[in-house]
Image (spheres, coloured by chain):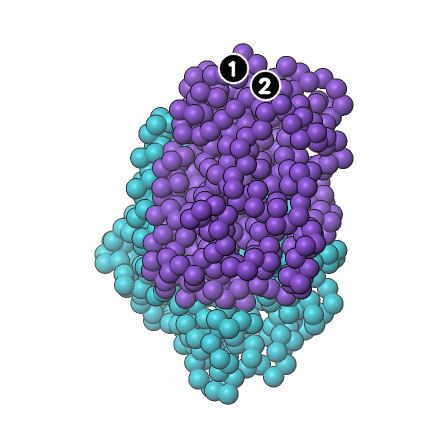
Chain colours: A cyan, B purple
Amino acid sequence: MSAAVPPSSAGAAAASLSYEQAGVDYARIDPLKVSAQRAAAATATQLRAHGFSEVAASRGESAYVVDVGPFYLASIVECLGSKAIVADEMAALTGRSWYDAIAQDTIAMAVNDLITVGATPLVVQAYWAAGGSDWFADAARAKALVEGWQRACERCGVAWGGGETPALAGIVEPGRIDLAASCTGIVSPKERLSVGDRLGPGDAIVLLDSSGIHANGLSLARKLVERLPQGWLTEVAPGLSYGAALLAPTVLYSPVTEALWKAGIAPHYCANITGHGWRKLLRHEKALSYRIHALPPVPPVLRFIQEHAGHDDREAYSTLNMGAGFALFVAAPDAERSVEIAQAQGVGARIAGRVEAGAKELVIEPLSLRFGDESLQLR
Amino acid sequence: MSAAVPPSSAGAAAASLSYEQAGVDYARIDPLKVSAQRAAAATATQLRAHGFSEVAASRGESAYVVDVGPFYLASIVECLGSKAIVADEMAALTGRSWYDAIAQDTIAMAVNDLITVGATPLVVQAYWAAGGSDWFADAARAKALVEGWQRACERCGVAWGGGETPALAGIVEPGRIDLAASCTGIVSPKERLSVGDRLGPGDAIVLLDSSGIHANGLSLARKLVERLPQGWLTEVAPGLSYGAALLAPTVLYSPVTEALWKAGIAPHYCANITGHGWRKLLRHEKALSYRIHALPPVPPVLRFIQEHAGHDDREAYSTLNMGAGFALFVAAPDAERSVEIAQAQGVGARIAGRVEAGAKELVIEPLSLRFGDESLQLR
């Protein structure tokens, strides 16, 4: 797709395909991230002049939280990533637009992060930066994007506030679109705040099912298609093409977290399982062990990627969601009811493990896998 | 820069250069905008389930406002546009990074819009989408971006909450970066809300000086460089190159609006003068006449663009800010003091005109220009 993606490795189909080979080099991004995080942290004092303060524990979490008095304010901006390229490829092959699903993916990236801190999402803003004005001239595609966006907002109970639709020739590639969403919400009442202070031994780990790859790991998935004889139309299950399976929209989890609160359940912590796969279960900085005893079913497209990329379970579970899109850490007595509440919202769920005292590690017993503290450095 | 930009017109240097020729076709974007706005408006009812409601008058304004009880919540996402390309060109020519200024521009796009509704900006989120991981490997450039971002946040009294730094090979052009910012704030106390209900005949129009082109009109400015024998290094004033002049960072106006409120002045309405130039003074839907009797000085780079693009005053003032970056519509008795308060914040200001009863129009008396209601259709 671009000069920044390394040369095709299609000639070495049996070789394992790493995330770095697929064009994302975290080592180069991370030094900037560290300096940006430091500079960002230094600005927190600005809130004092307004009589407010940040919730310091939200630094490094998935959404930023400010105490504005009667409640907490949470905000975030999130990028879709490269999934829209798959939609473009599939549109060329199938003659229909997949941007209704892509819209949901984009909103999910923002909303599913925002809710981890206990926030109720209220407003979503759209960021649709196209490679040129002509992107918007495809009426069917534009309609799919608008309708999918509206539907996802309605599913999450948020107002779509507005947004930006710039034409960025020279920055965004011709024919492409850079999609992102910002989301603002409140944590109200304040005891809904979940930044991990109540996370501790004995908590149950409830995993909510994913619908497929969601919107992380797409660089790898796109690279892989070069190895497939029928490309995007290769079947991952009878009647289901690789491209269509990848484009299953990301599950929106805010109906679950809202329903939990209505039932009196405030998770002690949440992790949105995106990049870094199951290593995201190690997200909180506390020294705790996370022991998994039950696995969710693996969506066919993820098993397919694992097999064709030549990944062992360690690499697969440390990169992809492998069926778990969101983790709730709840008090053990709330676990069964949390599962029922999620299922009542149409989201598959299971009690998958428990939090234990001990060294910081994730143990996936059914697969005999262990990930230590060194596995995930996000802060 | 890109296939989406029409072929060079450098051979016809004497011909006038329109915005459409420069690669932005509003006719193609606007139908999508209309359908998106309708779909967005339909989602407002989602707030009811949370016990909240939108401020309907903020639909179509520069920021979206929700009534959350004790105060209003305002939010926005804004794109820098193509100004970063100028920074890249100038970096190649001068050997230094201009991204400190670019950072301020990006934040200004969001903050200057957010404050129009009377909001105090509280949190900014960064959206930095690069064409590949290698963008972040240029340490000097990354440092300039981070430092400029922090400084602009501090100038605006906002906390930098976090953000996204995706590497989007295949979507963002190699070597480029798509910059945007989201901003969340509150309108508190609620009487600070300025969505135009108090705007009326007799109000004074106070114009705040711009520093140059700010971040709108850059497609035109970039196209124009092809006509200049010395390109970006052509002098627009002694010792000031065209490229450097374009890269003067956008003025941050939130220190002015905050200082006004502290002095007891709540503007009846505000307009951030961005795309569409002075036609933005016609932004509010009320049938009112805006009569300008005094003009701000025109920054050399804007006069230079006007001359070299062969624009008459009508075209220049309807495209560029021509020295006025932000408009305050205040009660006439507050006008003089508003000017003094702005100047005390280091922002040039003047009483430039008044609001009158009459047909919706903007009359710029010193230039004998009139823009009617048909000149600006943003909603």
Q: Is residue A277 left or right of residue A359?
A: right
Q: Nearer the viewer, residue A50 or A342?
A: A50
Task: Classify 10 Å Cα crowding around label 2: few (below 14), some (14-19), many (20 and above).
Answer: many
Task: Classify 10 Å Cα crowding around label 1: few (below 14), some (14-19), many (20 and above).
Answer: some
Residue B232 screen position, x and y as percent: 50, 56
Task: Name the residue: 58% across, 38% down.
Answer: B321
What kind of residue is marked 1? Asp
- Considering the numbered disc 1 on the image, is that residue within a helix, a strand or a loop? helix
Q: Are marks 2 and 1 in contact (CB under 8 Å)?
A: yes
Task: Name the residue: 52% across, 24% down.
Answer: B350
Residue at mark 2 to residue at mark 1: CA–CA distance: 8 Å
Which one is earlier in the sequence, the residue at label 2 or at label 1?
Answer: 2
Is A266 located above or below residue A213 in the figure?
above
The label on residue B334 is 1
- Considering the numbered disc 2 on the image, is that residue within a helix, a strand or a loop? strand
Residue receiving disc 2: B204
- The answer to whether one can see residue A376 in this image is yes
Q: Chain of mark 1?
A: B
Residue A112 screen position, x and y as percent: 49, 49
